[in-house]
Image (cartoon, rainbow, N blue to C red):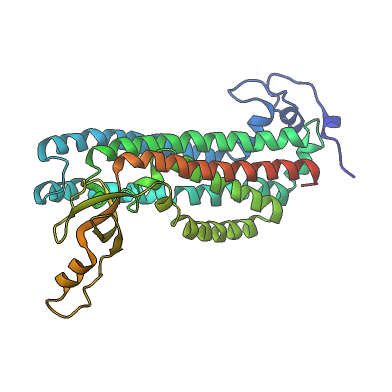
Amino acid sequence: MTTDIRAESRPRSEGHTPDMSDTATGRTSGGLLHGLPWLVWRRHRAALTGGIIVTVLASAFFVYEHFAVVDLVQQYGSQPGERASTKFGNDFGRIFRVGAGLLTFLPAIIGLFLGAPLIAGEQEHGTIRLVTTQSVSRARWIVTTLALPLGVVTLCTTALSLSYWWMWVPARSLAFTGDWLNGGPFDITGPMLPAKSLFFAVCGIALGMLLKRLLTSMVATVVFMAAFSIVWDRVPAHLAALRHAFAPLEHEVLIASDAINMDSWVATADGTFYGIGTCLESTEGATDACRAKMGITQSVTDYFGFDQMVGMQWRGSAILFALTALILGFVAWRAHRRPL
């Protein structure tokens, strides 16, 4: 038999500490958060407070380094070259690599240590049953439980994404050898970092709600995130149309230093593309004759321009935001229709 905590009410005095009933029904006074939001914050305050502190410190560091990067670019130039590349590597190479590595793994950390325990931990410890015996509906509980942590995740990852972007852009041709698509910047700047963080968080929440055991949920979340990352690595290259740059046959095709070289071809004057190795298997001295017979006159490079990056990020983020909304809808539906 469940005991109603409200039956144990006592006079509220100046030194009275709010009990679970006070919190669940919104009667807690004082402070920035009240009632159920305060309870959610208190239950997860270590993860949320830690995330906010790390965000403030890391964002401040990235902003500070931005000005040092600008000074280097003004002195040595922003284009790759022995002098500029060596100086950048010595002064900022490690900072950029470590920062990108931490932000790359941040969505997985959020999914594992915030998403998976968010509901699974409450189910395992019986907190949900305790709270919902008060005058708090399951609908209100699930909305508050999801909204507060996910709101903090959105604000923190947006701040980190923007501050890293500001540090990276002035030296984008020097950092990661100019590879913004595969080197890290694509996934950790713009809307991609918040989108991926929210997606992994809600996946962890959904798995935790279904499995109802903290350790099992965390293991399942790790497996899911690893499998999804393998699939997702193939997606960015399909988020925009490739551009083509041409040059006379056997000449180097020139593209911008911040463009991403995706593939190389040879082509005829009418635009028919052939593989770069076409006719190379011919006997010595016959390659030129073979290509002349086929009408091959141009070298071609497929590439993505830096100006395409933001559009590609928003398309990728739209996919992740849509998946996040579907999973959140499922979590809300199941929490409302079935016992937790």
Position of residue 275 relative to residue 139, above or below, is below
User: Who is closer to the viewer here, 261 or 291?
Assistant: 291
Image location of residue 125, percent across then percent down:
71, 49
Picture residue at 15% right of the left edge, 38% below the top: 72
Describe residue 303's horizontal placement relative to residue 142 as left or right: left
- Indicate the quadrant where residue 5 lies: top right
Q: Quick check: 273 left or right of 48? A: left
Tell me, yes or no, if residue 302 can be seen here. yes
Kindly identify the residue that appears in the image at 61 percent across and 41 percent down. 325
- At which x and y percent is residue 100? 35, 48
Q: Position of residue 97 (x, y in %)?
A: 30, 51
Give whichever of 172, 15 is nearer the camera: 172
Q: Quadrant of the N terminus?
A: top right
- Quarter occupied by residue 46: top right
Can residue 94 be seen in this snapshot? Answer: no
Q: Residue at x 51, y 41 (%)?
A: 318
How many numbered marks have been drawn onto this rendered protein structure?
Answer: 0
Most distant residue in the right direction: 1
Q: Compare residues 293 and 169 and report the one nearer the observer.
A: 293
